[in-house]
Image: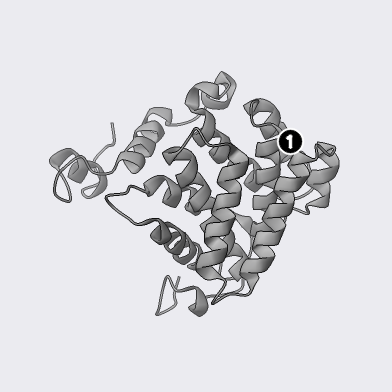
Amino acid sequence: LRLAAMGFPEKSNKYNTPGSLTAAVSVGMFYNSQRLIPPQIGELAAQIVSLTHGDPTAFLSAAVLAYAITGILMEPQLPLETQFLSAVSAMEQQFRGNYSEAYQVAATLKAAVLRAEAAEPMSRVMEELQCYSAMNCLAGAIYASLANQNDFDTAMITAVNHSGYSSAVGAITGAILGAKMGSAALPDFYVESLEPVDALCQLAGDMLSGTPAKGLFDDDWDHKYVQGLPLL
C-alpha cells in the first residue's frame, strides 16, 4: 500500500494468498451495463487485488471470480458450470497477452469444473486441490459449489473440511452460491448471529443497485457513504 503507483499489477508484489479474493466478489456485484463495460470488471478486480496480492495467479483468479459473480447476478438462469467456464474464458482472452500465468489459472479452474462433473469423492478432491493459494482456493470453491449446487449447507461443509485455507474457500463458496440461490436459501443459523446483519444487507443492496440519483449522489447516499453517518 506504500507503493507510489497503486492498482497496477506489474508494479506489485508476489503474494498469492486467498484473502484477496473477497474483494473480487464486491467488484462482481458492482457491474451494471450503464456503469461499466464487461472487460472493465476483470480489469478492476485485477487492479484492486494487486494492491496487496501481486502474484499474477492471484489477481487473474480475482478477475475470474468477479466475472463469475457478475454473470450469476446478470443471468441467473444459466448453469453454474457455464458461468464458471465463461468467466475463465473471459479472463484468458483479456490477460493472456500480458501474463502467461493466465493459461495456468485457466487450466486449474477448468480442471475443478471437470472434477465436479466426474462426481469424485468430495473429501479426496478437496485435499488434492491443495487450497493454499488464491488460484487453488478458487478452484476449491468452484468444485464445492458445483458438487453441491442445490444444497448450500452441504456445499459449505465441503468447502471448509480440508487442510487448506478453509475459511477462504468457505467465504468464496458462500458468495458464489449466495449469488446463485439468493438469501432465502441460506439456513437461518448462518445468518442469525451476524452483526450487524441489517446494515450488511443494505450495503449489499446499495452495492448492487448503485446510486439512486441521476447524478453522482443524492442526499441519503451522501449521508451514508461520504459523510459517514449511521447506515441505518
Q: Position of residue 207 (x, y in %)?
A: 35, 43
Q: Provide the secondary structure element on which disc 1 rests.
A: helix
Q: In the rendered view, does 194 fall on the left or right side of 119?
A: left
Q: Is residue 136 something that shows in the picture?
A: no
Which class describes the residues within 10 Å of circle 1: few (<14), some (14-19), or many (20+)? Answer: many
Q: Is residue 6 above or below residue 113?
A: below
Task: Give percent across and percent down for residue 57.
Answer: 62, 66
Residue behind mark 1: 158
Q: Kindly identify the residue that appears in the image at 57 percent across and 58 percent down.
A: 89
Coloring applied to the structure: one colour
Determine whether, in the image, residue 79 is placed left or right of residue 132: left
Q: Quadrant of residue 130?
A: bottom right
Q: Is residue 225 left or right of residue 65?
A: left
Up/down of 223 relative to 110, above or below: above
Whole-percent x and y of residue 51?
48, 67
- Which residue lies at the image location 37% right of the left edge and 48% below the top edge? 30
Please provide percent x and percent y for residue 141. 66, 44
Instruction: Identify whether 17 is placed above or below 117.
Output: below
Residue in the picture at 64% in, 26% down: 150
Q: Quadrant of residue 222?
A: top left
Q: Name the amino acid type tagged 1.
A: Thr
Viewport quadrant of the N terminus: bottom left
